[in-house]
Amino acid sequence: MDASAELTRDAVSDGALYIYQSKNGYRFGLDAVLLATDLPQLPADPVIYDLGAGHGAVGLMIANRRKDAHVTCVELQFSLFELLKKNVRENGLEGRVHTIRDDVRNHRSGLEAHAADLVVCNPPFYRVGQGRISPIAERAAAHQEMNGTLRDFVAAAQYVAKPGGRLKIILPPLRLADLVEAVGRTDLRGEWMRFVHGRESEDAYLMECVFRRGGAREFHVRPPLYVHDGDAFSSEVRNRFDTAALPDS
């Protein structure tokens, strides 16, 4: 069965936004919510690109929260791109969310140069052959670098970002060296990073990183984020889930 044939309709921020996604294919989780929240300060009417947008969870959360934002979501996989278009339409965001089906490796021919105030990116976490490969093609391609490496995504982000524009990316810490190498080939420079731990006693399993094109005044390692407090989400994580798609007041 096509992974997108059986869908669920999932609420974000208590129904401020709804995301259709495959029951058995790629599904968004905490990493998408973290990527879409705690963003760098943006100007009025910001232009935002979501590279490897999947079914649009990250880009649509941002667009729903920032009513002045113009968001471009770029996705290659056909099944996810069809869901992306459906989610844009079902949430009434056609006027402000533009969708492009393209490969980030084609960024010089398919994307607009120096256009974005912010680029967000939740790239595949693993190199091909690293980690467990899902038998479901949609999930496998979302999690493994089958359609572009981390270096490809970073190069595309640099291309679409304005001078002074920012990239926010989320990855597991095992990719830190790869991220440093990829960014070192560009004029993106680190602004801040933050490690995400399940609990205080556990190693970090995600990292949020923000880079600024053309350099940043200082680089900060922010205090860690703990996902759980006992058996419940921590107050910050709960707040980020609750407000991820709520319009800014």
Image (cartoon, helix red, strand yellow):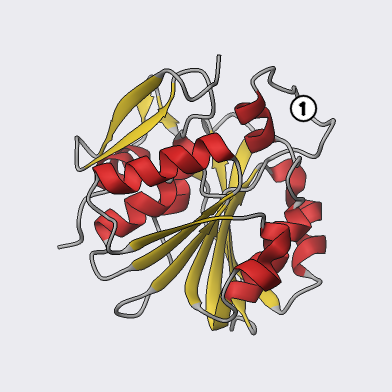
Residue placed at 67% from the left, 54% from the top? 103
Q: Quadrant of residue 155?
A: bottom right
Q: Residue 108, position in %: x, y?
A: 69, 72
The image shows residue 183, relative to residue 81, as above or below, that is below
The residue shown at (71%, 79%) is 187
Residue sitting farthest toward the top: 1
Residue 156: name its quadrant: bottom right
Check the picture and name the quadrant holding the N terminus. top right
Q: Is 191 positioned to the left or the right of 148 in the image?
A: left
Say which of 46 and 239 sits in front: 46
Q: Secondary structure at mark 1?
A: loop
Task: Please name the residue shown 31% across and 77% down the image.
Answer: 45
Please name the residue that numbered disc 1 is placed on. 131
From the image, which quarter does the C terminus lie in? bottom left
Q: Residue 183: x percent and y percent?
A: 74, 67
Q: Is 219 on the left-hand or right-hand side of 133?
A: left
> From what the image shows, is residue 115 above or below residue 79?
below
**Three-letter code, disc 1:** Gly
Residue sitting nearer the eye, 117 or 188: 117
